[in-house]
């Protein structure tokens, strides 16, 4: 089954969009997408139907989320390192 | 490993993987006489055979080609038939082709114009490889008794040193001469009539000139060679690991792959590592000579994207571990033709 | 340049450096939680595929146990449901099915077996293809509708758009949220958190998990399918476990909102209703199966055709199935490597259980990617 692949809308004809997935064009139906879609939008496709429009800035938002996750962890860890430094011992992670 | 219950030959027996090798061993190798003396014979199941001839080796290889479709982006069955055999000779260390044979089995009704097109392809590829067809055979079978066209080519060459596919040792590195997955993805796209905007093209090409340069540059430091045809890089590395008894760690992110191939593979749910290549070589070399081999490859038009992709260890002998960049897993030897997940 | 753009963005979710950092974070979080094992479950074949393909289990810290639950819709389709499709096919009706279902064993046979015996079974990649098939021929076409709710949306949309008179649906869709309840309530379970499937949540919204979290006091994180998505999702989950915060976190904001896709939901519930039923290996799941509403009786294959199962059940099931532990595997109680048949008598070429047949089955995925995804060096 073709599961949840994101693609870029190239053209729209009624309920059918032509969507580009990494350079491959496919027809995707727009019957159940809940927002208006125009050429240039990114959509999530599932077994031939577009199920969600992906706002371009969301990609950045998600990546930022991961960075934030890591930064927060570092901050916490810096504090922990102070404490650990007093007690002694190495917080080095096992790699992989 | 072939199950005794296999009373009928199945498609998997031709797929280039374990099932095929088991069939060959059980059905043929174990029942034919061995090479009887020094040399590389049937039992080695290498890319070709090597027979001592004076102070040199006579290298022989044969291949039958049944590809469908006959014409594909980047080549055709003719170009494939010549390149495949020339490359098998080159993988044994024999880069000066003495002669090629060509047998043709044609289905009644096959287009003569197509046959001429294929002939021209054969001719052109021979010239590139500095090889000549010296003898052959022609048969015609009734409509429906065969699918279009089958070509068989046999090649002979002399070599002063034979390079087996079993020569890897712990510490050696493996270099891939260029991008992976080109041929298989192009053929699959055409076969399944997938309209792919990127224009995927087969990489089918004779490699003997490129390999000649490698052997001239690094000599005995080149210890093993194999071309990753059916079953792709994965299959070839698994075989090399098993025959040499070493462990191989394949660094996924280092494998050169064209953006268009990667994209098509993602979409079709196929791993470029298990897909056939017809213009690439895997070269096992002592680590201190790797740079020299890379330079020799990159200096040749067919080797521009050459890269070190794997290292050999004594741990987990006979197994190939794939480092994915996020973790690692065992690389299984693929069985059967990959089928696209077509959406 | 369009392709380059979308590809580059996609590749940012595969940055190994970020991956290593996230793995480091997982390790620290496990240390802070300070016990082992910490068991979390995901319920999506696509998550398992990504985990296996990228060898993530080899990177997970020792205490973290990521279990695949009943996330393969084909695998949990119970034998009688498969039997219905097989019986129809054997009675001469042409059946269209997703590829994965073709070789799933029913009580006696699979659709592939039926096909080998002369039945007409077509493999399609979308419900649209099955509808097109019906438009092109005069004969009856039954679409064997398998898959979870995300896939059910497509079936619903196709019916709502109108289908030819010779088209009908054998509904075998499944609905995931109820089975999470079952797993959370199983006595042997020690699941401390769930990773929810991003694409299903794109439709249902992450709001559907709020009641679950409230009832069971287990956190749920919605995650996407790239390696970074999964690692980050697990990091979020471990944080919630560490802080004892049973709540829902959306780690897939680019595709998922709290409400989800209302239009898709409306389509789904206009066509389907949830009923309780058996899932292969999990016994009864209340509201876990989707069936066509009465208004759609005219396209319901179960009402259009008389399906004779008695004929099939005179076959004794093959002996090997008794040794198959797919049920335990799907409930997350065992791994494929615990099964005596795995990799030996049960392989993709000759599968015994559904988990080895479907491309989203745990056993099939493990087998394809080396059989031992917990490879640690």
Image (cartoon, rainbow, N blue to C red):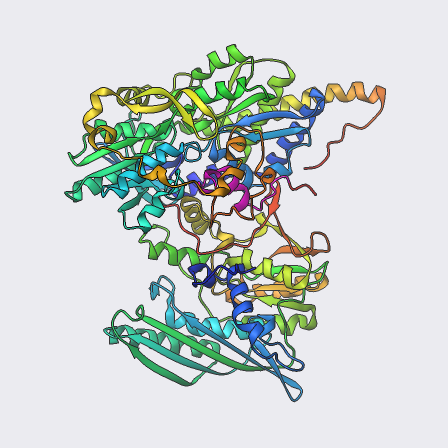
Is residue B88 shown left or right of residue B316?
left
Q: Residue at image x 38%, y 63%? A: B74
Q: Nearer the viewer, residue B329 or C227?
A: B329
Q: Residue at image x 52%, y 22%? A: C183
Q: Nearer the viewer, residue C16 or C349?
A: C349
Q: Nearer the viewer, residue C235 or C325?
A: C325
Q: Is residue C42 above or below residue B241?
A: above
Q: Is residue C256 magenta?
A: no
Is residue B78 shown left or right of residue B45?
left
Instruction: Return the x and y of residue B138 as percentages of the image width and height.
Output: 34, 82
Magenta stretch bounds = C353-374
Q: Residue at image x 64%, y 14%? A: C243
Instruction: Return the x and y of residue C62 as percentages of the image width and height.
Output: 69, 32
Q: Is residue C262 above or below residue C63?
A: above
Instruction: Return the x and y of residue B172 as percentages of the image width and height.
Output: 70, 60
Residue B307 in sight from this viewpoint: no
Q: Quadrant of the C terminus of chain B?
A: top left
């Amino acid at each position: 089954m073709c599961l949840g692949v994101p693609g870029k809308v190239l053209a729209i004809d009624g309920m059918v969009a032509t969507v580009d997935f990494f350079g491959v064009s496919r027809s995707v139906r727009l019957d159940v997408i809940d927002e208006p879609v125009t050429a240039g939008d990114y959509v999530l496709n599932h077994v031939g139907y577009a199920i969600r429009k992906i706002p371009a800035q969301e990609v950045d938002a998600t990546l930022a989320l991961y960075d934030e996750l890591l930064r927060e962890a570092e901050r916490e860890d810096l504090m922990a390192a102070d404490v650990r430094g007093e007690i002694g011992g190495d917080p080095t992670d096992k790699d992989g | 490993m072939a199950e005794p219950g296999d009373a009928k030959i199945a498609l998997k027996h031709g797929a280039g993987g374990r099932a095929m090798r088991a069939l060959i061993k059980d059905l043929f190798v174990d029942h034919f006489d061995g090479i009887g003396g020094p040399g590389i014979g049937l039992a080695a199941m290498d890319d070709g055979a090597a027979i001592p001839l004076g102070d040199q080796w006579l290298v022989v290889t044969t291949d039958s080609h049944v590809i469908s479709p006959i014409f594909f982006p980047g080549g055709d069955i003719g170009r494939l038939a010549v390149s495949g055999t020339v490359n098998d000779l080159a993988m044994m260390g024999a880069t000066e082709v003495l002669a090629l044979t060509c047998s043709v089995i044609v289905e009644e009704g096959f287009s003569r114009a197509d046959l001429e097109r294929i002939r021209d392809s054969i001719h052109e590829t021979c010239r590139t490889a500095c090889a000549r067809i010296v003898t052959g055979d022609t048969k015609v079978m009734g409509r429906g008794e065969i699918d279009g066209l089958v070509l068989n080519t046999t090649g002979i060459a002399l070599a002063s040193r034979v390079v087996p596919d079993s020569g890897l040792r712990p510490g050696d590195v493996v270099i891939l001469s260029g991008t992976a997955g080109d041929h298989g993805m192009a053929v699959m796209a055409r076969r399944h009539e997938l309209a792919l905007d990127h224009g995927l093209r087969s990489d089918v090409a004779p490699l003997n000139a490129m390999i000649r340069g490698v052997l001239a540059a690094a000599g005995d430091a080149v210890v093993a060679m194999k071309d990753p045809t059916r079953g792709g890089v994965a299959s070839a590395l698994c075989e090399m690991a098993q025959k040499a008894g070493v462990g191989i760690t394949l660094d996924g992110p280092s494998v050169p792959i064209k953006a268009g191939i990667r994209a098509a593979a993602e979409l079709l749910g196929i791993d470029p590592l298990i897909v056939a290549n017809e213009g690439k070589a895997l070269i096992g070399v002592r680590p201190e000579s790797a740079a020299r081999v890379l330079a020799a490859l990159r200096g040749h038009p067919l080797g521009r994207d050459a890269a070190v992709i794997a290292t050999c260890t004594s741990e987990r002998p006979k197994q190939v571990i794939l480092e994915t960049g996020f973790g690692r897993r065992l690389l299984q030897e693929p069985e059967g033709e990959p089928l696209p997940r077509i959406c | 340049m369009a392709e380059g753009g979308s590809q580059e963005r996609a590749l940012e979710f595969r940055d190994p450096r970020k991956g290593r950092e996230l793995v480091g974070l997982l390790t620290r979080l496990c240390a802070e939680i300070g016990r082992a094992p910490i068991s979390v479950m995901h319920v999506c074949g696509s998550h398992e595929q990504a985990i296996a393909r990228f060898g993530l289990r080899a990177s997970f810290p020792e205490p973290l146990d990521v279990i695949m639950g009943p996330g393969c819709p084909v695998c949990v389709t119970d034998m009688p449901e498969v039997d219905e499709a097989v019986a129809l096919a054997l009675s001469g009706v042409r059946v269209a099915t997703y590829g994965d279902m073709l070789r799933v064993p029913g009580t006696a046979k699979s659709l592939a077996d039926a096909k080998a015996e002369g039945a007409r079974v077509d493999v399609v990649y979308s419900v649209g293809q099955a509808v097109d098939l019906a438009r092109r021929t005069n004969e009856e076409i039954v679409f064997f509708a398998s898959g979870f709710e995300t896939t059910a949306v497509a079936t619903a949309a196709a019916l709502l758009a109108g289908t030819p008179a010779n088209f009908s649906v054998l509904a075998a869709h499944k609905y995931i949220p109820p089975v999470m309840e079952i797993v959370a309530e199983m006595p042997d379970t020690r699941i401390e958190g769930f990773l929810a499937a991003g694409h299903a949540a794109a439709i249902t919204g992450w709001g559907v998990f709020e009641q679950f979290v409230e009832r069971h006091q287990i956190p749920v994180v919605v995650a996407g399918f790239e390696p970074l998505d999964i690692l980050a999702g697990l990091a979020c989950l471990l944080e919630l476990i560490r802080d004892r915060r049973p709540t829902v976190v959306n780690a897939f904001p680019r595709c998922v909102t709290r409400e989800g896709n209302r239009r898709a939901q409306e389509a789904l519930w206009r066509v389907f209703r949830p009923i309780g039923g058996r899932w292969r290996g999990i016994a009864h799941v209340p509201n876990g199966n989707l069936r066509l509403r009465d208004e759609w009786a005219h396209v319901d294959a179960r009402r259009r055709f008389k399906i004779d199962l008695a004929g099939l059940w005179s076959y004794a099931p093959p002996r090997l199935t008794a040794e198959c532990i797919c049920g335990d595997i799907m409930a997350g109680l065992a791994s494929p490597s615990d099964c005596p048949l795995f990799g030996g008598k049960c392989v993709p070429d000759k599968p015994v259980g559904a988990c080895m047949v479907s491309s989203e089955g745990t056993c099939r995925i493990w087998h394809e990617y080396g059989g031992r995804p917990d490879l640690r060096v």
